[in-house]
Image (cartoon, rainbow, N blue to C red):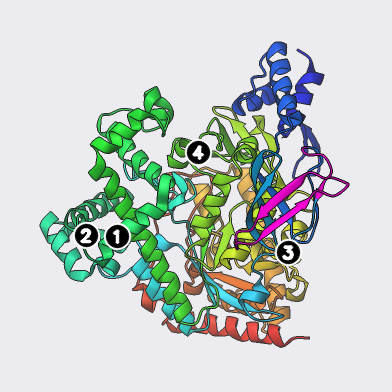
Amino acid sequence: MSDKRLLALAEAAGVAAHWVDANQRPQRVSAEALRAVLDGLGLPAQSDAQVRESLARLRQDAGAAEPPALLTQEAGQPLSLAAHFPAGTPFELLGDDGGRLDARLDAAGRLPGLDALGYHQLCIGDRQLTLAVAPAQGATPQALLDSAQPRAWGLAVQLYALRRAGDGGIGDTRALERLARAAAQQGADALAISPVHAMFSADPRRFSPYAPSSRCFFNVLHAAPSSLLGEQAVRQAIDAEGLGPELARLERLELVDWPAAAAARLRLLRRLFETFRGGAGRQWQDFLRFREQGGEGLENHCRFEALQARHLRAGRPCDWHAWPAALRDPRSPTVARFAAEHADQVSFHAFAQWLIVRGLQRAQRAARNAGMRIGLINDLAVGADGGGSQAWSRQAELLSALSVGAPPDLLNPIGQDWGLCAFSPRGLQQHGYRAFIEMLRANMAHAGGLRIDHVMGLQRLWVIPRGAEPRDGAYLHYPLGDLLRLLTLESWRQRTLILGEDLGTVPAGFTAALAARGALGMRVLLFEHDARARFRRPAAWPATAMATTTTHDLPTLSGWWLERDLEWRERLALYDRPTLEAARRDRERERHGLRRALARDTGVRLDEGVDAATLLDASMSFLGHTPAPLVLLPMEDVLGLEEQANLPGTVDQHPNWRRRWAGDSGRLLESAQARQRLRLLAEARRQAAEAP
């Protein structure tokens, strides 16, 4: 088989045959791995004949005179269309504001630079295209916070961990409202929440918020129906179902029992729907409008939920790839017939989506009305489950035959397979970036900010063939320019701040490109040191990144100090003895380095025997003194907790995504310890704002 032709196919498909690892060593993808990745992209490459045929198809597509369905343009900058239309070709541009422009391409075959931002219709030749004109920057911290040198702060919370009386064992949007008001009273401008993407109603054993069924819809288990339908309606439904004792039991648990809590919550929601449907009041009309506005996307998601539940009840596979052929196509007559025959089930899932969306909107209004200048910050997962709703609904635009992960690196020597599927670069371009835009809009609709997990995925993702080892993957490149322009345009339109989680192996120039668009990167206290454990001074932190103490995948600051994460890894045999001993030596050096950095910043003596609480207090001031426009403090560190939300490399061995916090969400910040930490942070933020 010709390696030269295989490499040409990989290059044409955007698959990198060579890459540089975390140790800055050049690596090469094996021919076998390249062929498997190309197969997953729908480009058969198992023989010379297949490689020739796939390469010819790509070259034919690239050389076609047909322009893409959607073009992106920088505001004020001309756009070349010379590859598709000759110079002087007349065109008509219909602006989304109702304006109209009749002109011709210039002598170089370019559209003129346009100042009108938005999505416009371009009629040229015999084609009608969408032209997305993007601003240089999206919603910047300076604009949202109304300050040339913003120094704001907020909290980061796991939504499921919040408590309130009557929540049934899972944190909900009503508890979120209470926390938002309480945080705003103490000066917070933002409240970042764990992902609220739609999960699998039929299979509540799958509850990792970063492995959703769809990133365009929402987890109905977080809905608080009493916020819309009233306490009396909910109480009557609980009594009718006999759920009172079970809900009370679930509320008392220290950990979320996802299967049991989901079963109880869905029974309650179904009973409420039975009473609600067919009404004639204001809420019923609002539900009908919501469903109409949701269009095909909402309908497909609800049909998928009903179809998957039917398969599970019958003991058949939940993954749609194993369904009968007629059910694998969301537009098939068989699916339409199923939806008509099971209209009540489909409508129920639309009702549940209505409840959670309206609840999230209420929480954002509560945050803004209480004084937050940003409010909720949603979290966007890097991918979706290949057997889920989004992959079924948008099959041509997602790569359900490949899994996203990470190559071997310093922290994970065997690499990582996250079990998620990502967008198809070719599929996105061929469909006018429809799936990308609808995902952004859904997650920006009720938030003031959007955190994008593994934001480097806008440029490249490590993709792994199903069943292969993580090391046998390759980097797949994406049209970064188009994606950044669309992200910037949607950020500007929705007035939504973009936070990009740019931790790990970051492509050269990527962080600068993100910052140029007005988006913030992410810097974590536990990582801000060199190989000799010398921590960076606050003033040396970048002014283009959000600052935080830790993340959901890392130990809390107290847990890090006390080595709780290493204790877990020892208990679960995740580290062998030499690795564990080396990790403990490194931790001791890092503790010493952090003590020195905090003492230098605060002027407070921090001896060898300093306790975790004192360390936390000093860290509040340290982070607050950085020039970061926004500091997000995890609630675990506000409360001084030792256990982390998620321990990477585990599934059931550690209670990932299950820990609940003690106390009502509206009163979490009332303890003397919490108030002291927030006071220190707020004061340090004020000092940083006044610094020259």
**Who's the residue at 23% across and 45% down the image?**
344
Residue 196 found in image quarter: bottom left
Q: Amino acid at mark 1?
A: Gly
Q: State the image coordinates of residue 392 (x, y, percent, origin top left).
A: 45, 36
Q: Quick check: is 98 in the magenta stretch?
A: yes
Total numbered labels placed on residues in the image: 4
Q: CA distance from mark 4 to mark 2?
A: 37 Å
Q: CA distance from mark 3 to mark 1?
A: 51 Å
Among numbered discs 3 and 2, the one appearing first in the sequence? 3
Q: Amino acid at mark 2?
A: Leu
Asked if labels 4 and 3 touch by Cβ distance under 8 angstroms, the answer is no
Residue underneath mark 1: 169
Residue underneath mark 3: 115
The circle drawn on residue 212 is: none
Residue underneath mark 4: 394
Q: Amino acid at mark 3?
A: Asp
Q: CA distance from mark 2 to mark 1?
A: 7 Å
Region rendered in magenta:
84-110
Give the class, few, some or many, for how many residues have Cα within 10 Å of label 3's Cα (few <14, many ≥20): few
Q: CA distance from mark 3 to mark 2?
A: 56 Å
Tag in front: 4 or 1: 4
Mark 1 falls on what kind of element? loop
Tag in front: 3 or 4: 3
The circle drawn on residue 247 is: 2
Give the class, few, some or many, for how many residues have Cα within 10 Å of label 1's Cα (few <14, many ≥20): many
Drawn side of residue 192 relative to residue 6, left or right: left
Identify whether 616 is placed above or below 305. below
